[in-house]
Amino acid sequence: MTDDIRIRRAGRGCRKAGRLPIVALAFLLAGGVTGAHAQGTPLSGEPITPVPLDVVTDPARVSLGQRLFSDTRLSGDNSISCSSCHMIARGGADGLRLSRGPQNRVPPTNTPTILNVSLSALLNWNGRNRSLTGQLREVVTNPHIMDGEWPTVLARLRADTALAAEFRGLYPDGITQDSVIDALAEYERSLLTPNAPFDRYLRGEADALSPEAKAGYELFKFYGCVSCHQGVNVGGNMLQAFGIFGSPAAAEGGPDTPGAARDTGISPSEPVFRVPSLRNVAQTAPYFHNGSVQTLPEAIDIMANYQLGRSITPDDIAQIEAFLNSLTGEYQGIPLGDYQP
Ligand code: HEC
Ligand code: HEC
């Protein structure tokens, strides 16, 4: 039974990989590698699309949400805010293997980035949320994250007369669970990082990518990484088993691995996770649901071995790393690596 599922899944991966060279060929014929496509002619038919340059958000709600995002009154003991763990200047995460929650509690999984979060179809390592508001409904009361209670949080915020007046200006009912969640969600929608070198390349700037990064993108497609990490967020839109060809150390708990999804029907023997977005991945070490891997080359090597069943050369790994580095975008016009709050 288990083996059937493995074989079926492996077969699917191979078919994908088999089809990809055709995509690569079409790309070559379109002049992608020779640079024949004119500056400004966007590439078409690629499995990854650029982060939108603009997003329509309501500036007043964004501003309110931004303040709430770094407001410790949203946590039970007033000690911690969303931005304690999700820092824009640290790639939207915190650089820790596992974060420190309230009362030094440690969340069971690594903190994912908050950047471009609105572009992911599934949220959380186990993909349990499908909307920003759904995620926000549970985050305040999560004992490892904010450990708050809505009535207390709302009472504290309502006692702030200036804040209460500002809310009333935007929401007829003033400060409520729904309006707090709405403002936070609007802020999250504003957190896009467009203009990564790779996106500029997709938009037709042939020189935006180094030859190494271009070769890395071809390998990313050829090996089949793109069968899981694709779409605008280079991930974020499906659940997959972690360890299709053998079990990586990070998945040693099998389906009981902390953070894994249960009863998905995808694999009864391996842990199942939401495929993470690889946008800004060079800024978001350490990697994997348990933060066990510090460097991109190591993460790429594990992916090739355990998700695709192939061992790839250090040169290939370096090229794929160059491609992943080209996925670092800009926040408010500043390359994310240089952004200071
Ligand atoms: C103690 C650190 C910590 C704090 C504080 C924190 N988070 Fe998180 N956040 C996490 C962790 C860990 C996860 C992953 C949890 C999981 O998947 O089960 C997460 C996941 C998320 C996600 C889903 C991202 C994705 O791509 O799956 C969003 C959105 C988010 N947090 C927003 C917030 C907001 C808003 C706040 C404040 C109300 C907040 N977080 C406070 C650690 C933190
Ligand atoms: C079969 C689906 C699948 C394929 C194919 C795949 N990945 Fe992944 N990838 C995942 C899943 C699932 C995770 C999350 C694993 C975890 O954290 O437990 C992941 C995580 C990652 C991470 C860590 C991201 C982070 O923020 O922690 C990187 C980097 C990565 N993959 C790169 C690649 C590369 C490069 C390839 C091709 C060599 C590849 N992946 C192929 C499913 C896949």
Image: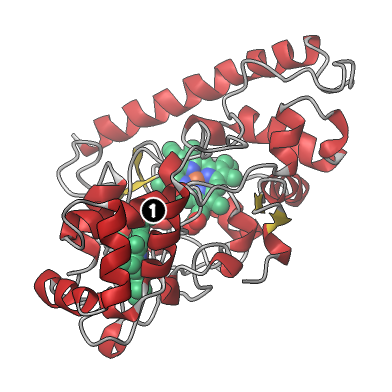
Residue 327, horizontal then vertical, whole percent: 66, 46
| Res 52 quadrant in image | top right
Q: Quadrant of the C terminus?
A: bottom right
Q: Residue at x 60, y 53 (%)?
A: 280
Q: Is residue 4 visible?
A: yes
For the N terminus, give its image quadrant: top left
Neighbor class of circle 1 (other Cα within 10 Å; few <14, some 14-19, many 20+) is: many
Quadrant of res 38: top right
Which quarter of the frame holds ligand 1? bottom left
Q: Is residue 16 left or right of residue 82?
A: right
Answer whether residue 125 is visible to the viewer in this image: no
In the figure, 187 relative to 263: above or below? below
Quadrant in the picture for residue 298: bottom right
In this view, the residue in front, 25 or 191, is 191
Task: Give the residue at the far left of this rendering.
Answer: 151
Question: Residue drawn at (67%, 51%), measured in percent from left and top?
Answer: 328
Instruction: Name the residue: 50% across, 73% down.
Output: 94
Give the total number of marks visible in the rendering: 1
Instruction: Residue type at mark 1: give it.
Output: Arg
Q: In the image, is 42 to the left or to the right of 48?
A: right
Q: Is residue 197 left or right of residue 250?
A: right
Identity of the residue drawn at 41% across and 24% down: 11
Residue designated by label 1: 61
Say if disc 1 is inside 8 Å of ligand 1: no
**In this view, which residue lies farthest toward the bottom?**
103
User: Circle 1 — which element?
Assistant: helix
Residue 184 in the image, given as x and y percentages of width and height: 34, 57
Query: Which is nearer the eye, 11 or 259?
Result: 259
Identify whether 41 is placed above or below 179.
Answer: above
Q: Whole-percent x and y of residue 309?
A: 50, 40
Residue 231 pos. (x, y %): 51, 31
